[in-house]
Image (spheres, rainbow, N blue to C red):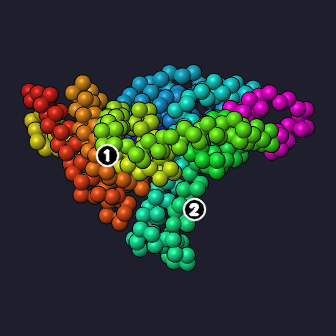
Amino acid sequence: MDKKILAITACPTGIAHTYMAAESLEKAAAEQGLDFKVEKRGALGVEDELTEQEIRDAHAIIIAADTDVQESRFAGKAVVKVAVAEAIKNPQRLLAEALAKEAVPAAANYIEQAEQTKEQRSAQRTGFYKHLMTGVSNMLPLVTAGGLIIALSFVFGIEAFKEQGTLAAALMDIGSGSAFALMIPILSGFIAFSIADRIGLAPGLVGGMLASKLGAGFLGGIISGFLAGYIAFWLRKSIKLPKNFEGLKPILIIPLLSTLAVGLLMHYVIGTPIKAVMDAMTAWLSSMGSTNAILLGLILGAMMAFDMGGPVNKSAYTFAVGLLASNVFGPMAAVMAAGMVPPLGMFLATLLSPKKYTKEEKEAGKAASVLGISFISEGAIPFAAADPLRVIPSIMVGSAVTGALSMAFGATLRAPHGGIFVLPIPHAVTNVGMYAIAILVGTVVTAIMVNVLKKNRE
């Protein structure tokens, strides 16, 4: 009987890597004639969800994910676990590794297997990046919706929302008073959820709410999320009760103790110093001179291009998104502009010097143009994978130039995603004309530099 291989792909934003990884695995599986199915956990939710029957029948499961994917479903199964980018770059290797796995026998003692797998998952739950990105990915829809709704309120005038009973006031209440108010609790709650599963959600949400109320901002939310997750996880491992009372642990005992511990720590230990750090950072960012602003934009821009959706890229992005809650909008503009440059630059490069690129690369360039205007940096990955020593420095320089120009021009952005599609929305972006020039300059710099470094193909 043919071995059935299943896969699941998920990236923090659920926009690009999720589907690129799934497509890469599907193509490789089709070339080998494998019985294969992939579940995609994207921004719109779960697509092609794996059924219990399919999981039972599977020989092995490939998990290519940087966020939580409910791994408890795969208890007792052979699993290959990697970062989502690995599935884009090396699908054949992952399939070979999955096929080489020894099939787990139909469980004579399924509970014992599940416990062993739970221990393996516990050992894997040490990735700071994975937990942070789970929080960020669940927070992003609130930031996007809230930011754009706030921008819409400004259509009626910058201060129109101050007049109670008006549509502008209602829009501001929806965007700022509700969506933005939930950002930090959701960030904290889902970091804790990634670490401890459902028992981490309550203390994480409460810790995030306290961080928001105390003025500790997104840094406080990140800290409270990790505290809540690891405290809840430790309590689950440490508290031993008679079997008849085990049901009280997830419903009463762990939520009570973990929420109390996180709440007291936030109030008396963590909240005040983190608030001081956030206040100092906000004050510095708000009063930056042009030289410091340009330097910050330069660094953020280079980080966005370095690994195109990887940990460094997401670190810069998370920093900028977190500052939106503190009403600091300049870094977000620099980050989005810089993130658009790598695919746009490579598209322009294929147009300017077609003899330096294969037919496949020229086709990839057309796709990259669409991804670029949509703020999906991953569109440059095929070029970087094929020629990293020339492409990566070129896109880093172009993105750094764009980030620096965006900050120098004083551009601000209230929405954390959307690419050029948010530019027409009134007040979503300030200084739109110069912002567009910053993106164009970085695109041209990238294209010229990469074409100077590349040689004509034979």
Q: Amino acid at mark 1?
A: Met
Residue under circle 2?
177
Q: Amino acid at mark 2?
A: Gly
Crowdedness near tag 1: few (<14), some (14–19) or many (≥20) residues, C-alpha within 10 Å: many
Regarding residue 450, the answer to whether it shows in the image is: yes
Q: Is residue 356 left or right of residue 196?
A: left
What kind of secondary structure does the magenta stretch mostly adopt? helix
Q: Residue at x 80, y 27 (%)?
A: 238
Question: Relative to 279, is 130 above or below?
Answer: above
Q: Is residue 315 left or right of residue 299?
A: right
Residue 267: x, y in percent? 71, 42
Q: CA distance from mark 2 to mark 1?
A: 28 Å
Residue under circle 1?
407
Q: Secondary structure at mark 2?
A: helix
Q: Quadrant of the C terminus?
A: top left
Which of label 2 and label 1 is nearer to you? 1
Asked which quadrant contains residue 151, the reply is: bottom left
**Nearest to N terminus: mark 2 or mark 1:** 2
> Between residues 30 and 264, which one lies in front from this camera angle?
264
Residue 302: x, y in percent? 32, 34
Q: Residue at x 24, y 54 (%)?
A: 434
Q: Are marks 2 and 1 in contact (CB under 8 Å)?
A: no
Q: Is residue 176 left or right of residue 76?
A: left
Residue 330: x, y in percent? 38, 49
Give the number of the disc on residue 322. none
Magenta segment: does it hold 242? yes
Q: Secondary structure at mark 1?
A: helix
Q: Point out the stretch of residues depicted in magenta.
A: 230-253
Regarding residue 193, the answer to whether it shows in the image is: no
